[in-house]
Amino acid sequence: MPAGVVDAAAKGVRLERHAAGAAVLLRRASGAKQLVSASSHLLFRATVLATLALVILFTVHYPSLLSRSLSLSAAPLSGSSSSSSAARSRSSHRSLLGSRASYGGAAWEREVRRGATPRRDGGLSVLVTGAAGFVGAHCSLALRGRGDGVLGLDNFNSYYDPALKRARQRLLASRGVVVLDADINDAALLERLFAAAPFTHVLHLAAQAGVRYAMRAPQTYVASNVAGLVSLFEVAAKHADPQPAIVWASSSSVYGLNTEAPFSEEHRTDRPASLYAATKKAGEAIAHAYNHIYGLSITGLRFFTVYGPWGRPDMAYFSFARSIVAGEPITLFRAADGADARRDFTYIDDVVKGCLGALDTAGRSTGSKSGKKLGPAPLRVYNLGNTSPVPVTRMVAILEKLLGKKANKRVVTMPSNGDVPFTHANVTHAARDFGYRPATSLEAGLRHFVDWFVQYYKLDIKGSNVLAGKTTKRKSMAISAAS
Ligand SMILES: O=C(O)[C@H]1O[C@H](OP(=O)(O)OP(=O)(O)OC[C@H]2O[C@@H](n3ccc(=O)[nH]c3=O)[C@H](O)[C@@H]2O)[C@H](O)[C@@H](O)[C@H]1O
């Protein structure tokens, strides 16, 4: 083959190779282009989906925050049917302020600050724990009513019907008090709250209540009444600026086996009869330590069998009322010596006055975030009772009269379950320091309770005028359970 032909052939082969290479490159380039275009489609779709998800999330959460005052002002002030109550309960669960998972953020902090800000000159800024509880709800309303800033928190546990707690939450919301769905053992949340608002006071009422239930669920008492209390004191002492003054719920049960009466704050409290009492006594000792080390101003209030409207269904007066209406038997405990058990039943309005009096006179904490204590801070403990013990049998007789129906009574010797045969408060210290003067007889207080009870549970009491506070003979009764 001539050399020229060979060269030409060789050039041709090279050209073909170049052309083939170029074609491969072109193919690759177009593949890459397709890839890029496919990924940008994917990216676009992902962005659209993410935006949609955000819009849905926003719509679900944000309106409850924005329209809270509107929607809740329309909420009923008393009980309602179970289905609507459950629906509202679900919607409040969704609210930005109410959801445990969603706290934090600028909007949340604004709402916390708004709640905590007093509406009157010199007003207090109070964080109320257990605000959807019996005493907590009443105190929150009273504080808000006089223009103090109030922010509530509650874990809405199911020790008793959470629907009642949600109803109290709605009642509070209708009066401008927000109750967060939160636990006192959530230290991170407490830190955020104190960072968001300079609370001057904490009214700490969150606790595991109930004397006899402590035998069934001992750990819950330790978790709420000991660990929870420490969690709150820790944050108040080390993270709050300024440190708030703390008023908290101790209990008449700390007197335990004390036999001196009436019970005075000077009497022995080192013989608790129940784990409940022991955790409250432990709380008083823990309060001493935090006051001593960190300069926290702390006031413990020993409540004596508090009762009234919006009360606790686990307590005897409430559960007896339900049983009487339903025609079910009630069990009455009689002391070992044959005497009727007696209680210094204390009406809720009197206790609320005591709580507000204790807050108003609490005195400042003297410590700071840095751990420096400027001097001794107040450490106080007061009885808040009624000063007139009443036999439980008498309480039942009053309920029978108000409800117009006889109780089916079974009397047994008081079991060894932490109960004590009687309580009786001496309240001279509370009277001296903040003018505490209980003014409600058991008859008057139970009448208010029964009025509420009948309304809340929508009792169908034919031929009666219980709602007007008077009792006449009735033909039939039934609870249309709201719970
Ligand atoms: O002051 C407190 O520090 C506590 O008060 C309350 O405890 P108590 O005074 O024990 O109230 P409560 O259970 O209503 O029993 C009342 C009476 O009914 C008797 N009682 C009770 C139940 C029963 O089935 N039969 C009965 O005779 C019983 O023997 C008793 O004599 C709070 O629950 C508690 O959380 C705490 O705050």
Image (cartoon, grey):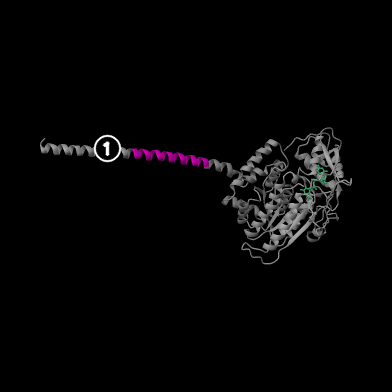
Is residue 141 shown above or below 377?
above
20 or 354, which lies in front?
20
Under tag 1, what secondary structure? Answer: helix
Q: Nearer the viewer, residue 227 or 388?
A: 227
Which residue, given by chain and number where applicable, does mark 1 sit on? 23
* Magenta stretch in the rendered image: 31-53
Q: Is residue 310 visible?
A: no
Q: Is residue 40 magenta?
A: yes
Residue type, mark 1 in image = Ala
Instruction: Locate residue 57, reporting x and y percent.
Output: 55, 42
Seen in the picture, residue 427 relative to 315 is either above or below; the reply is below
Rendered view: 466 above or below 362:
above
As for residue 312 lying within the magenta part, the answer is: no
- Residue at the bottom extreme? 375
| Outermost right residue | 338
| Residue occupying image coordinates x 20% and y 39% | 14
Residue found at x 49% / y 42% = 51
Q: Tell me where residue 132 appears, x and y as whole percent.
A: 70, 47
Could you tell me which residue is drawn at 63 percent across and 41 percent down? 91
- In terms of image quadrants, where is residue 35? top left
Label 1: how many residues lie within 10 Å, few (<14), some (14-19) or many (20+)?
few
Q: Is 130 placed left or right of 339 in the picture? A: left
